[in-house]
Image (cartoon, grey):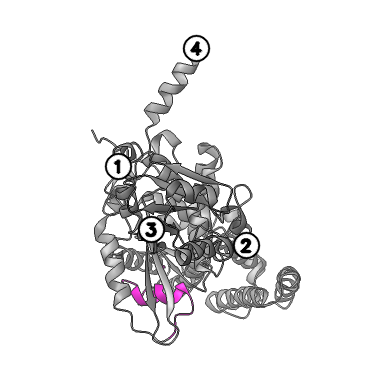
Amino acid sequence: MIKKKNDQNSTESQTPTEIVNRAKKSSDFKEIKKNVSGVQIYILYFTTLIDHKAMERVFLPYINDCEKKGDPSLDIIHFKNSLPLEDVIRTQDAKEIEEKIYQGYVLIKFENTSEDCLLVNISNLSKGIRESNETENEFNVIGPKLGFVESLDTNILLLRTKIKSPLLTTEEFVLGTMSKTRVTIVYLDGITNEEHIETVKKRLSKIDFDIIWDTSVIDQIIKDNSRTPFPLYMTTERLDRLTYTLTSGQVVIFSDGSPYAISGPATLLDFFLSSEDYYYNWVIGSFFRFTRIFAIIFSIFSSSIYVAVVTFHYEVIPADLLGPLIESRANVPFPPLLEVLFLEMTIELLREAGARLPTKVGQTLGIVGGIVIGQAAVMAALTSNILLIIVALSALASFTTPTMVMSNTIRILRFPFIIMSSLLGGLGIMIGFAVLLCHLFRLKSFESPYMVPLHPFRGNSLADSIIRSPYNKLNKRPDYLRPIEKIKYSPIKGNKKKEDINDE
């Protein structure tokens, strides 16, 4: 049986110095040294969590004045009483020190006072959150709407407000020979597999590019296979989705100037999971997830099956449906392949035009354009009304994908299957499906198999794949990520607390 290490309780046996040394692993943790009256003072804080205006206008000027005056009577007590800020705490409690520095407090240590420290509150947590915007491309009906912005420091701030743990570690790189873009990797120290962290570091260090515009550029450069249309890393603008991937044991990459973060290793099934699944009851969440996967399969194969049936396999059509189908195609002068390609390209044109136009105009164009063009195409005998329904449902089903990057892949996949079905019918669809599976089986994300837990099969990781299990079954991190700490939380402990309450 796997035992979980309680990293929070281990704080009690640590000293403030050990806590500081652990925090120094993060690139956004800063240390300033000042010499006042011959005494070395250490000022330590997270740059992403503090209010820099208060730091520059009040805190640092006071420190500099003390340094210039050189007051020989200045000690930690005098310093605490004369500091022009209200929330100042003197403590030796390691647990309190750890909690406060991750809440935006500045830690002050005097060289001659052993473990006695001051904690000064100049937090930016309450001011920085609303600088961010709501998610624009990943919508949820319920749950938080908070998304990332273009500022790297604000994004790290948002992440630290959600994960207030000393395990959250950041490391910064500067990429782009001309842009000098700040790129930060984030992971949970002691949970995320070291091999994945080193893989990310090695690939980032090898990047030789002039300008890094967005994390999508980094995604393409460090990709395990640049010839695949499938996204190999999760791209998201949602804070809740990213915190889930972090706590599962993935590595996250932020880029300054980009509101999107990428995380990996990712699997194919990850792109069909929505944050909303976890806010509903597990039965409802599983139903929505299963419906979503079915819709994606329908979107890929529906048009190609129509071409195969109409071209080669009339015998599989029920007798009651055969008459209406023949009647609808009686005046269509084109073969099924051209008919389907015409409608599919029309849908793609409407979708692209709607995405490039202002929101209200784009919505109007999509609705009116779809109705007018579809009706006109049927009236002009350019296509059958049955195919129009199939293509419309196929396009609608493709929008059920929670992530835009996978939705674009689904749009592309339809066309090879349509061509194969026009050449070989049902056999062509099967051959295309076999080639697709072989391609997926060969893909990797940060050297981890892309099709796991289906291939290689990992039964223990199926609890959060095609279905969403109850929370008492989601207490383990996925095996395929090979996390150092495999247990997220103890459902047994929670059940014991409930029993104790019931007994009372």
Please name the amino acid that badge 2 sits on: Glu
Mark number for residue 22?
Answer: none
Q: Does dot 4 land on a helix, a strand or a loop?
A: loop
Question: Of discs 2 and 1, which sits in the foreground?
Answer: 1
Q: Residues within 10 Å of mark 1 (few under 14, many from 20)?
A: few
Q: Residue at x 42, y 81 (%)?
A: 180
- Queried whether the magenta region covers residue 275, the answer comes back as no
Q: Amino acid at mark 4?
A: Glu
**Residue type, label 1:** Gln
**Closer to the observer: label 1 or label 4?**
1
Q: Which of the 4 quarters of the picture holds residue 211?
A: bottom left
Q: Magenta region's main secondary structure? A: loop
- Which residue does the image show at 49% across and 66% down from the upper left? 64
Is residue 391 in sight in this rendering? Answer: yes
Q: Which residue is mark 3?
A: 42
Distance in Å between CA atoms under marks 2 and 1: 36 Å
Taking 448 as reference, is 286 above or below it?
Answer: above
Dot placed on the residue nearer the N-terminal end, 1 or 4: 1
Residue contact at pointers 2 and 1, CB within 8 angstroms: no
The residue that disc 2 covers is 131
Q: Give the mark toward the camera: 2 or 3.
A: 3
| Nearer-the-camera pick, 223 or 209 | 209
Q: Residue at x 40, y 82 (%)?
A: 176
In this orientation, which residue lies closer to the viewer: 491 or 417?
491
Report, in whole angstroms, how far the alpha carbon at label 1 lies from the one at label 3. Answer: 19 Å
Magenta stretch bounds? 211-231
